[in-house]
Image (cartoon, rainbow, N blue to C red):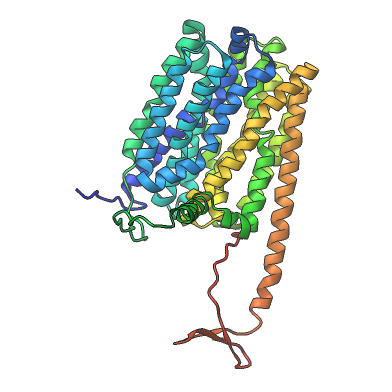
Amino acid sequence: MPQVLERAEGCWAWVVLLASLVTQGLTLGFPTCTGIFFTELQHEFQASNSETSWFPSILTAMLHAGGPLCSILVGRFGCRVTVMLGGALASLGMVASSFCHTLSQLYLTAGFITGLGMCFSFQSSITVLGFYFSRHRALANALASVGVSLGITLWPLLSRYLLENLGWRGTFLIFGGVLLHCCVCGAILRPVATSTAPETKEGPPPPSKTSAPGCLAACGAAIQRHLAFDILRHNAGYRVFTLGVMWMILGFPLPHVFLVPYATRHGVDEHKAALLISIIGFSNIFLRPVAGLLAGRRDFAGHRKYLFSLAALLNGLTNLMCAASADFRVLVVYCLVYSVSMSGIGALLFQVLMDIVPMDRFSSALGLFTILESISILTSPPLAGLLLDTTNNFSYVFYMSSFFLISAALFMGGSFCVLQKKERQGRPAEAEGAITEVASEGGLTVEDSRGSEKQLYTEITYVTSV
């Protein structure tokens, strides 16, 4: 029985937006609560800071590294099935982690399996928004990212309450049930009608005698389709953005992991320390829609990448405030200022990527982007944990975070300025002759102001939006 396709920008699009909001709250908002369990897990398994840091590191890395596999599943089964599969995997991982007896088992269950499931759910919910929204895409992305803010607000409070009453094992078991709600959100994502004609499914091809070269060619085509290496080669803006975010991520997740242990180490009550993360999330609930509305304005359409660089710069400078003092009142002010820059990064991250790459290649571009980003995510907390074990001073962790964020912001902002300047210089050269297209049997010809005809060759290029 054929499925009824929903209309883009229709009424159901806003229901899908709500489902995406909840999914992002359940998945992207979850890693911020791992700091609540940091000390508890460290005592349970008698582990160092660096060893304990691998748990949130693997979880967050898998949340991004599964992008290519998620892209394949979305292309084969659609966003609905992929989100539901992700919810089932995330739940299974958390339930299994409640029975772990070693830290390495926790890496596999709560880190690898749960992280991969969350990746399937969140990336599919991001991708489906690009098909349901076109005119209001910036606003839709910003509103959906409010779910992350809600997750950052509620997960730490829920974690602290459950940890005190059930311990970390009982808490992880409850989390497994909570993450099953991703399956409910996935069921809402009905297929959307697009302008692209559906692919015709043919029967399996007959077996070929040259199976080995054919298999290699098929693998190469699949990698090219799902990892977007062609965009990485030809699109300078995509290269700059990907490298800049990779460098930025080496510092960005550190406050989420180490802020609570940093506060408790300096005498802040555990409840107040958990409240700091919730303050960041609660502030983002209001700040992200504002950031999305500003980013969606026509005046800022060509400057979103610069706004993203500015948000990263502010984020790095804010961390210096946290390193200066561990007084609770100072940390509250830090969280409020940090929320401003974090809301800008959260609201603009995927929107800038959508501006830079064609929408029909967004899924594969997102896959490559997130798998490269996950390399930084995987190494950042353990590297900071090693620094903490060596110095026994949390301030160096926040100095490290500031360095990576500030340098990444300066790199992206400067590189985008250079690319825009080159593009502006290239425009007068293209517009020197008045070009008139003339259709002919031999192909497409152009006629310049002097009347001479030239042959045009078809070429696919990717350029940054300005």
Q: Residue 173: x and y, percent?
A: 43, 15
Residue at (68, 68) in percent of width and height: 424
Q: Residue furthest left?
A: 1
Tell me where residue 1 appears, x and y as whole percent: 19, 48
Callout count: 0
* Front residue of 123 and 298: 123
Asked if 387 appears above or below 239 in the picture, the reply is above
Q: Quadrant of the C terminus?
A: bottom right
Q: Outermost residue, top direction?
A: 165
Q: Position of residue 183 (x, y in %)?
A: 35, 31
Say above or below: 14 vs 105: below
Q: Which residue is painted at 64% across and 56% down in the image?
A: 237
Decide if residue 344 is in sight here. Answer: no
- Give how far across and how far down residue 281 sits, in percent: 55, 28
Which of the 4 image quadrants contains residue 231? Answer: bottom right
Q: Is residue 123 left or right of residue 426?
A: left
Q: Nearer the viewer, residue 367 or 465?
A: 367
Question: Toward the viewer: 49 or 18?
Answer: 49
> Looking at the image, which residue sits at the far right?
391
Q: Nearer the viewer, residue 355 or 338?
A: 355
Q: Is residue 437 visible?
A: yes
For this orientation, the residue located farthest to the bottom is 451
Image position of 21 (left or right of 49): left
Residue found at x 53% / y 46%: 366
Residue at the spot 57% in from the left edge and 53% down from the top edge: 229
